[in-house]
Image (cartoon, grey):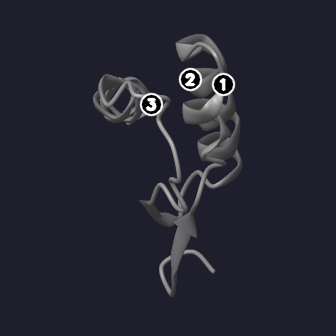
Amino acid sequence: MRGRYVVSLKPSPSCFAGDSFDADTVRHELTDKLKALKGCCVEIIMKDISTVRYSPQRLWEWARIVKETLDSMY
């Protein structure tokens, strides 16, 4: 697949639905998935968000974690 396709990485939105937002879990899961896809063209899409438990800042935190994770890996 490398160089021929774009992989759509769609993490689980469950991190937004819980009582609290666990940044370490988000970072760990994302890092594991990106390591498996190393060398591939990847787009990261958060799908099917039905709730953020009245905390839209969870979306901004998730986006910040994704950026930081990508910056540290590449």
Check the picture and name the quadrant holding the N terminus: bottom right
Instruction: Give the mark nearer the N terminus: 3 vs 1.
Output: 1
Look at the numbered discs 3 and 1 and tell me whether their residues touch, using CB distance below 8 Å: no
Q: How far apart, in angstroms, are the residues tagged by discs 3 and 1? A: 28 Å
> Residue at point 64% right, 16% down?
19
Q: Position of residue 38 (x, y in %)?
A: 58, 51
Q: Secondary structure at mark 3?
A: helix
Check the picture and name the quadrant holding the C terminus: top left
Instruction: Give the mark nearer the N terminus: 2 vs 1.
Output: 1
Residue wearing tag 2: 27
Look at label 2 and name its amino acid.
Answer: Arg
> Residue at point 30% right, 24% down?
57
Residue wearing tag 3: 73
Q: Comparing marks 2 and 1, which lies closer to the viewer? A: 1
Residue wearing tag 1: 18
Instruction: Give the mark nearer the N terminus: 3 vs 2.
Output: 2
> Residue at point 41% right, 31% down?
62
Q: Secondary structure at mark 2?
A: helix
Look at label 3 and name its amino acid.
Answer: Met
| Residue at the outermost bottom position | 4
Q: Comparing marks 3 and 2, which lies closer to the viewer? A: 2
Look at label 1 and name its amino acid.
Answer: Gly
Q: How far apart, in angstroms, are the residues tagged by discs 2 and 1? A: 16 Å
Look at the numbered discs 2 and 1 and tell me whether their residues touch, using CB distance below 8 Å: no
Q: How far apart, in angstroms, are the residues tagged by discs 3 and 2? A: 12 Å
Residue 42 left/right relative to 48: left
Q: Secondary structure at mark 1?
A: loop
Residue 3's disc number: none
